[in-house]
Image (cartoon, rainbow, N blue to C red):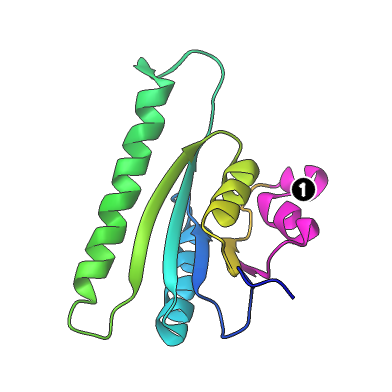
Amino acid sequence: MPAGFERGTDGPKVIVAGVDGSDTSWRAAAYAAGLARRQRALLAVVYVQPLLTGGAALGAPVAETTEEVAEELLAEIRDAAERLRGEPGVRWEFHTFRGDPYQGLVQAADDLKADAVVVGASERAGHRIVGSVAVRLVKAGRWPVTVVP
């Protein structure tokens, strides 16, 4: 068997948590942080800035708006990490991508050689028909995926 990258031999080394600012995504990030702490794994928090069509949102360019969301999410994550200072910590990184949330999470998980992906359940009713990012990640079957309600 060739040497190299192998998933799941000694527990997860990298856990990807998708965040978008929703309540379920924050619960997913907290759950993933607990997993990362217990497994001594790296927590990679990922926000995918959606490519919105239709020009501008409330007069601000869409790219600036999604960049502001990314900055706010990073600030909230840093605040949470600061509150936990002094406890055995979680090693974490923040990554942001632009594009389709599903594709961005797949890219992040592949690039980081993730052993697990944790996301929040969709809060949108339309996703029951079309399929949520979480369902698409589970169906991809490339990593263990935990969907947090």
**Who's the residue at 58% across and 50% down the image?**
105
Percent of width and height locating residue 138:
74, 61
Asked if residue 138 shows in the view, the reply is yes
The amino acid on which the numbered mark 1 sits, given as a three-letter code, is Gly
What is the quadrant of residue 117 in the picture?
A: bottom right
Q: Which residues are magenta?
A: 125-149
Q: Is residue 149 visible?
A: no
Provide residue 17's location: percent of width, then percent of height. Answer: 50, 61
- Verify whether residue 17 appears in magenta: no
Q: Nearer the viewer, residue 139 or 124?
A: 139
Q: What residue did someone put label 1 on?
A: 131
Residue 47, position in %: x, y?
46, 47
Q: Residue most toward the front?
A: 2
- Dot 1, crowdedness within 10 Å: few (<14), some or many (≥20)? few
Q: Is residue 39 above or below residue 139?
A: below
Count of marks overlaid on the render: 1
Q: Is residue 123 left or right of residue 80?
A: right
Judging depth in this view, the residue of 28 and 115 nearest the camera is 115
